[in-house]
Image (cartoon, rainbow, N blue to C red):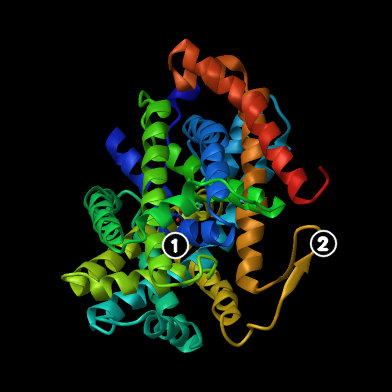
């Protein structure tokens, strides 16, 4: 019986533990670093609207499906897909979904760790007081100095990868639960403080208008907004599936999903409300790219009462948020190595960590010694750096594709009795979910893909 299947990796100690861990996975650099800069690059208002629509119509139904598949299969995504495909008498090729997810997680972590390294280094920069009273130019040059120095970037990237490997090797449960329980609310509180500061700049309404007044959006912007909905909710690559595989039976997947998606969205919107007023108050460019938060928030910390303390704490918490996401990025790979290659967790974590660290060099160099090396893929993008290429291919192609296949499997190929049994929710809610996942979600993903490559 499927309901009696057990994970060899253990289980969350409670429903709350799962919600915290999944929220820890979802809330990360994506919300505070990436959301503001891609919103800035894509013109604000309409981009935010498309992103919010994608969260509700695509992200939420897929998250429910992904947790459900994980809990039913109770193994790494590859083995879960194999077991469920067998059980539903479907083709074995579904294991490819697990493979693609595993590769996506590995690619994402390689650059995620480099950016988390920036945040790590900013803990010490901020604590040293260099930002006190600093001008926009001063703050800008601190960032420029950091990213143009490959050795410093490498050192921080290495430290962050080691931190990630330590937690993953001990099993995601130990340490993670406590970390998320206290640190997430603290991050939230500090974010509110920066928003409160942003209100005093005199440019708060400009920020609000930029984020919520619809305007122009490019074709590509729609794909980026959808890709970000997947990225920010950690969907389409098996991270949430593997977390679902440690979930005790009886926990309501639908309720948990609502909480995670709401918390994630609120943090992203707050980050935007904190950053854009500072951008406008200081005559900065909203489309400044990946350095945006590192060029704006320090200005606020430099001017706020107790800004050195608040700023230092903020970057500490940002690193924690990144940390709890990073471990979920390699957990699918580690779980698979343990299940299929008979490795112990420590060995599996070190092995994956070293490979990821190595690939991270590409991202480090793309900000300095490789800054003139570019890649293009016809119909998708032209002259992107190594980092932009990785980011684009994972967030905008691999995750939505993974999500599309998860939707097809859960809504079309899995028997209704199986998904009903696993979700065990109100009939109306179940029906709504299934309709969304059968029709709305896949069609929306396909339309956005076709639009991005200019077919429609
Ligand atoms: N959701 C994380 C963030 O917003 O920072 C990033 C992430 C984690 C993406 C895990 C994908 C994933 F599987």
Looking at the image, residue 411 sits to the left or right of residue 219; the answer is left
Q: Is mark 1 within 8 Å of ligand 1?
A: yes
Q: Is residue 368 depicted above or below 332 in this figure?
A: below
Judge whether residue 88 can be spotted in this image: no
Q: Image quarter for residue 22?
A: top left
Q: Which residue is mark 1?
A: 33
Judge whether residue 31 can be spotted in this image: yes
Q: Nearer the viewer, residue 393 or 302?
A: 302
Looking at the image, residue 355 sits to the left or right of residue 303; the answer is right
Return the x and y of residue 77 as percentages of the image width and height.
Answer: 56, 43
Q: Image quarter for residue 118?
A: bottom left
Label 1: element kind: helix
Residue at 24% from the left image edge and 49% from the top image edge: 185
Q: Which residue is mark 2?
A: 378
Label 2: element kind: loop
Q: Which of the marked residues, 2 or 1, is nearer the chain's N terminus? A: 1
Q: How far, Cα to Cα, is label 2 from label 1?
A: 28 Å
Return the x and y of residue 114 as percentages of the image width and height.
Answer: 48, 72
Q: Is residue 96 depicted above or below 86 in this figure?
A: below
Mark 2 crowdedness (10 Å alpha carbons): few <14, some 14-19, many ≥20: few
Return the x and y of residue 237 as percentages of the image width and height.
Answer: 57, 47
């Amino acid at each position: 019986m499927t309901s009696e299947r057990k994970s060899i990796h253990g289980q969350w100690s409670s429903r709350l533990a799962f919600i915290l861990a999944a929220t820890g996975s979802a809330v990360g650099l994506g919300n505070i670093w990436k959301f503001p800069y891609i919103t800035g690059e894509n013109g604000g208002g309409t981009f935010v609207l498309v992103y919010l629509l994608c969260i509700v119509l695509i992200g939420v139904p897929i998250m429910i499906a992904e947790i459900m598949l994980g809990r039913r299969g109770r193994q790494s995504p590859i083995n879960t897909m194999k077991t469920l495909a067998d059980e539903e008498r479907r083709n074995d090729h579904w294991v490819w979904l697990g493979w693609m997810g595993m590769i996506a997680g590995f690619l994402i972590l390689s650059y995620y760790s480099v950016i988390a390294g920036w945040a790590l280094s900013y803990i010490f920069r901020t604590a040293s007081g260099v930002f006190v009273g600093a001008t926009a130019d001063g703050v800008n040059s601190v960032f420029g100095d950091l990213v143009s120095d490959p050795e410093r970037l490498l050192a921080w990237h290495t430290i962050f990868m080691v931190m990630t490997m330590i937690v993953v090797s001990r099993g995601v449960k130990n340490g993670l639960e406590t970390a998320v329980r206290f640190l997430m609310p603290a991050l939230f509180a500090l974010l509110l403080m920066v928003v409160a500061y942003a209100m005093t700049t005199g440019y708060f309404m400009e920020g609000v208008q930029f984020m919520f007044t619809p305007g122009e959006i490019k074709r590509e912007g729609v794909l980026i907004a959808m890709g970000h909905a997947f990225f920010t909710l950690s969907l389409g690559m098996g991270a949430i599936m593997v977390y679902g595989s440690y979930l005790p039976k009886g926990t309501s997947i639908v309720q948990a999903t609502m909480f995670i998606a709401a918390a994630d969205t609120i943090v992203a919107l707050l980050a935007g409300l904190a950053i854009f007023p500072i951008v406008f108050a200081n005559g900065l460019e909203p489309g400044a790219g990946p350095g945006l938060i590192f060029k704006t928030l320090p200005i606020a910390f430099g001017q706020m009462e107790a800004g050195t303390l608040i700023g230092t704490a903020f970057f500490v918490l940002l690193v924690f948020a990144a940390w709890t996401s990073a471990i979920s990025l390699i957990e699918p790979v580690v779980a698979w190595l343990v299940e299929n290659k008979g490795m112990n967790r420590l060995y599996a974590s070190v092995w994956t960590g070293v490979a990821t660290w190595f690939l991270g060099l590409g991202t480090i160099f793309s900000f300095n010694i490789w800054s003139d090396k570019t890649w293009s893929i016809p119909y998708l993008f032209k002259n992107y750096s190594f980092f932009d290429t990785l980011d684009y291919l994972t967030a905008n192609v691999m995750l939505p594709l993974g999500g599309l296949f998860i939707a097809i499997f859960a809504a079309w190929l899995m028997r209704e009795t199986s998904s009903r049994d696993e979700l065990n929710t109100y009939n109306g809610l179940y029906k709504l979910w299934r309709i969304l996942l059968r029709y709305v979600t896949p069609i929306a993903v396909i339309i956005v893909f076709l639009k991005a490559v200019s077919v429609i």
